[in-house]
Amino acid sequence: METEKAVESAVSEQQLEALGLKEAGRRLSRAKRLQAAYRNYQFIPQEKINLFNGKLKKETLTEDKNASRYKRLGFIRLENYPEIPPAHALKRLLEARKAGCFDSFEVCRIEWIEEVKDPILFGRIENCADRFFISQWDDDIKLSDIVFGDTARVEKDGREDTADRLI
């Protein structure tokens, strides 16, 4: 509430910071940028994105014994986006950057999600490519499937043993 009042007052962020009120200056700057963004751009609340993602998942969900697959909105930070947007989008991006409202930009597109139902838990050590088996649950995928492929039973010291115990 105080920040909203300050947005309309004559005090500036720089004046607040010069007086040692750095956090107040940052809050005022954010309030001004939010005010400009809401005034000049269409916005989508997170709840609408969540509802859309729920609808998209319901419409595209496929499942088998190993995984669920569905679509949802994916957001990619602009600096990580690998493609070149069309000219009209680049023009609008330039205008938005000049407006100075935003801390960052992101590209939204539909992506496929695959969730494996019964995972395997591994431990990792930095700068080591190996994964260390901790546990697994259920049996849609087993450690032996990864390590030995179709040969779930192997020979150890001249006797047959299960791959799960060898690892």
Image (cartoon, rainbow, N blue to C red):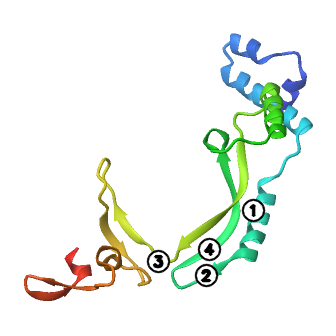
The residue at which mark 3 appears reads as 118
At x 87% / y 32%, what residue is drawn?
36
For label 1, the residue is 50
User: What residue appears at the point 70 percent right and 44 percent down from the top-left corner?
Assistant: 106
- Helix, strand or loop under label 4: strand
Mark 4 to mark 2 CA distance (whole Å): 6 Å
Residue 146 in the figure: left or right of residue 94: left
In percent of the image, x 81 and y 59: which residue is there?
Answer: 48
Cα distance, mark 3 to mark 4?
A: 14 Å
- The quarter of the picture where residue 124 lies is bottom left
The answer to whether residue 76 of the structure is visible from this angle is yes
The answer to whether residue 19 of the structure is visible from this angle is: no
Q: Amino acid at mark 3?
A: Asp
Give whichever of discs 4 and 2 has the lower sequence position.
2
Pointer 4: what residue?
69
Q: Residues within 10 Å of mark 4 (few under 14, many from 20)?
A: some
Quarter residue 33 falls in: top right
Q: Sequence order check: which comes first, mark 3 or mark 4?
A: 4
Q: Amino acid at mark 2?
A: Glu
Say whether disc 3 or disc 2 marks the residue closer to the N-terminus. 2
Residue on which the image places disc 2:
63
Spatial separation of the CA atoms under disc 2 and disc 1? 21 Å
Q: Is residue 11 above or below residue 61?
A: above
Where's residue 15, x and y in %?
Answer: 76, 12
- Residue 38's place in the image compared with 157, above or below, is above
